[in-house]
Image (spheres, rainbow, N blue to C red):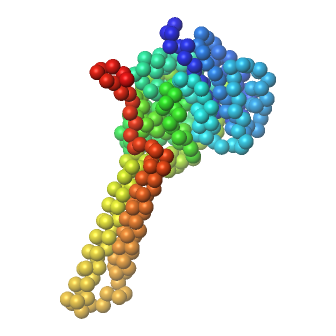
Amino acid sequence: MNPNTKALLSIVVPLYNEEENVVLLTQRIHKSLEGYTYQIIYIDDFSTDKTRKVITDMNDPKVHLLALKKNYGQSLALAAGIDYAKGEYIITMDGDLQNDPSDIPQMLSYALDGEYDLVTGIRQKRKDSLVKKIPSKIANFLVRRVTKLDIKDNGCALKVFTKDIAKDLNLYGEMHRFITLLAFLEGAQIKQVPVKHHARHAGVSKYGLERVFKVVADMMLLLFIRKYFQRPIHLFGILGVLLILLGILINFYLLIIKLGFGEDIGNRPLLIFGMMFILAGIQLFTIGIVMELLIRTYYESQSKRPYRIKNISIGGKPS
């Protein structure tokens, strides 16, 4: 066994109404990680069944239960578990037994080599209904086209992170769908590995076709963060200038008609559009300036830098 497997692992699993799955999941994790040093962190997202009681009754010293005060959703449940995790490597997975813990050692081996910061699964022969597969395929296609990040399966919950990358994810809203993209934006080196996928053992799925609309909305936000977070003036300022120029051109055209040809322009809708374009352009440009100042405040008030250094070496040796 690789001596690095003595490093503490944290398996983070958000749960919501999984009373029939959690005992079997715990047994499978123990079997798959025999010989490893690990903690299992279950985050109960305010289940309405007996999930919490089942976990408590196991009396398993390796199991840590975080019971949330209300239902926050998967992203914040994951964030709570990652914040609590003490491991050098943090592993996330679903609690419905569709992910197979036996895939963890293989995935972990890539992370232990030190070359990759995130190892993510690609579900093989996926055992899901079309109601889950269709939104997933649409989301994966959109992510690849919009972000140019070639990830085949963004929806696979089984992932192995280094601690530094996991702790910097800043999950909120429903960003768990883009957790691989968020890690990529943090500078993570990513490895994709085929993993097994099983039909749900018990309980019901919490997802449907409405995910498509949420995916699109979240992706628009991530696209802005990826391209313009550190330079919002380049987005809002350019759009603002273009609208102002368009408004000026329209009004200049109307001025020529008024002075050169003596035509009445007061009742023309084009005059209203010209003024609207100028006002909208000024507003967008102003928003760009305000956001630029906010970004500077964000970094400077927290002593953050807009870059991350992976490592430093002096004379070819790590310092």
Q: Residue shown at 73%/19% (left/top)? A: 60
Left or right, residue 75 beside residue 237: right
Q: Residue furthest left?
A: 260
Q: Nearer the viewer, residue 270 or 73?
A: 73
Residue 58 figure quarter: top right
Q: Position of residue 176 (x, y in %)?
A: 54, 38
> The C terminus appears in which quarter of the rendering?
top left
Q: Nearer the viewer, residue 289 or 16?
A: 289
**Does 85 sit above or below residue 288?**
above
Q: Residue furthest bottom?
A: 262
**Does 144 sit above or below residue 41?**
below
Residue 78, can we see it? no
Residue 318 figure quarter: top left
Residue 47 figure quarter: top right
Residue 187, can we see it? yes
Q: Residue shown at 65%/27% (left/top)? A: 41
Q: Residue shown at 52%/28% (left/top)? A: 163
Q: Position of residue 304 (x, y in %)?
A: 45, 43
Left or right, residue 242 beside residue 88: left
Q: Position of residue 149 (x, y in %)?
A: 38, 36
Q: Nearer the viewer, residue 125 or 185?
A: 185
Q: Nearer the viewer, residue 123 or 232?
A: 232
Q: Position of residue 217 (x, y in %)?
A: 50, 50
Q: How many marks?
A: 0
Q: Residue shown at 32%/60% (left/top)? A: 238
